[in-house]
Image: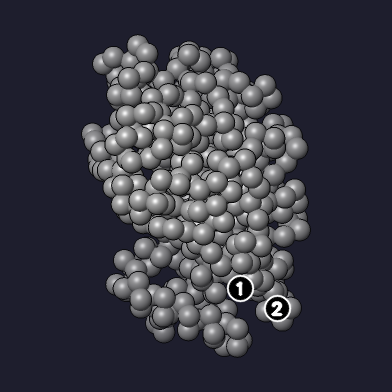
Amino acid sequence: MLPTITIDIGTTSVKLRAFDASSIPLASETHATPTVRDAWGEIYALDALTGYIERFVRGLEDADRAGMQRIAVTGVGESGGLVRADGSLASPMILWHDHRGADLLAPLDDAERLRIYAITGLPVNANYGLSKAAWALGHADDASDAQWLNVAEYVAARLTGVRWSEYSLASRTMALDLTTGTWSAEASALLGLDVALFPELRPARVGEPLSPSVAARLGLSDGVRVHVAGHDHMVGGVGADLRAGELLNSTGTTEGLLFLREAPRLDAQTARTKLANGIACTGDDFTLFASIPTGGSAFATLQSLLSLTPQQLSGHVAELSERYAAGDIDLDAMPLVLPQFRGSPPPTKRASARGVVSGIRTDTTAADLIFGCFLGLALQFRDVLDLFGQRAEVVKVIGPASANPLWLQLKADLLGVPLSVSQVSEVVSRGAQALASGAQGSWLDCDPRDVEVDDRRRDRLAEWEADIRPQWDDLKGLER
């Protein structure tokens, strides 16, 4: 590996890391992702974001900073804004879950929606960049030379003075033709856009020299190269050394399910599942991906709903994990929780969907609700995994769920598949370093541990699921 500074711009946090040539962390910082609200929704506070990055780099030990050879930037996949050639913004930098362009998609008929899937491998949805780019262009005062960049690509442009798009991020815009690997004039035209709005395409391994002025300001060598590593879940797949037949379960604010494929699935049947095709960060493989909007964010919901501190919630989870392992949980007494706290996953993908709790009794406790929530997360995961029509040979888990024994064991027992769980917290950052170094990630370096299936609990969960399945499907039908 090459000594690398990694920048991971997530939904709730920005993770800054510096690694040496042996992938040993030299320094790390985590900041809340800086955002503000404008008249339409939530946007990045970019001065704060770039300030975090610059202070982190300047704060490195002199010898460590002098030895850096790469900067690798990764982030969420559907954010973006219009950036002029001089680096100034022609629009706000819009967050991934902002739907300000939704009205521009409403006129598309069924045939046009199916055609977009056949070209881009994505279901029509306002999360993706195409409708945001159209909205931004319609609200820009001067966008004559502006191009659409993801927030990670914007940071790279600020560091180098050059605009480009990385393939895995480009494949989250709903403007990339997966078959040709080029921007689609046909898809863009459906929203009145010209493909000139989208920049040059590069795989993650192709970087750009740090601009001399930025290098001097940050105290870095002018030989440092900047790489856009790609979409964070896909970069995590590189860090986990994901192989064909393996499933990556990437957990964070949201929860991702990712398979690698030799070719995209662009048929009408797959389109109905609303699974998202894409191009891997390496540029050599395709991806099939589903995002569950509620993942780690369930913690914040439970803390707020039950007036718990993070420490109190963690204590409940630890105790429930022990009780579940000992067979001391009456599943029939637990409330049934549909955890759509941030919208629904495929195949509906409705941002307006809401969570539902059923089966509250006079003796229901806060611990029961917590258990029901994590059981609901596992059941929701199983439903989404079924859409792929593919059994995972191995499930590799990365992210915050790695430290939640209850969530992990419920998932393993419900799926009937053992999990291999990373015990290091920087898998995405390690993947970014590997991509910028032209190297391959190593799962063994992630110090994985196995979470085995307990046959007795698996059988009991199967009985419980068969019993509650009609009610569960009814709850999903309450979406609005």
Q: Is residue 286 above or below residue 434?
A: above
User: What residue did someone put label 2 on?
Assistant: 454
Q: Amino acid at mark 1?
A: Gln
- Residue 341 visible at all: no
Q: Residue at x 69, y 31 (%)?
A: 266
Q: Is residue 445 above or below residue 107?
A: below
Q: Is residue 386 left or right of residue 216?
A: right
Q: Are marks 1 and 2 in contact (CB under 8 Å)?
A: yes
Q: Position of residue 226 (x, y in %)?
A: 47, 35
Tag 2 or tag 1, which sits nearer the N-term?
Answer: 1
Q: Amino acid at mark 2?
A: Asp
Q: Position of residue 62 (x, y in %)?
A: 35, 51
User: What residue did someone put label 1 on?
Assistant: 409
Q: Local crowd at mark 1 within 10 Å, few (<14), some, or many (≥20)? A: many
How many labels were placed on the picture?
2
- Residue 452 visible at all: yes
Judging depth in this view, the residue of 452 and 223 nearest the camera is 223
Q: What's the CA distance linking mark 1 and mark 2?
A: 9 Å
Q: Position of residue 286 (x, y in %)?
A: 68, 37
Q: Residue at x 37, y 13 (%)?
A: 145
Element class at badge 1: helix
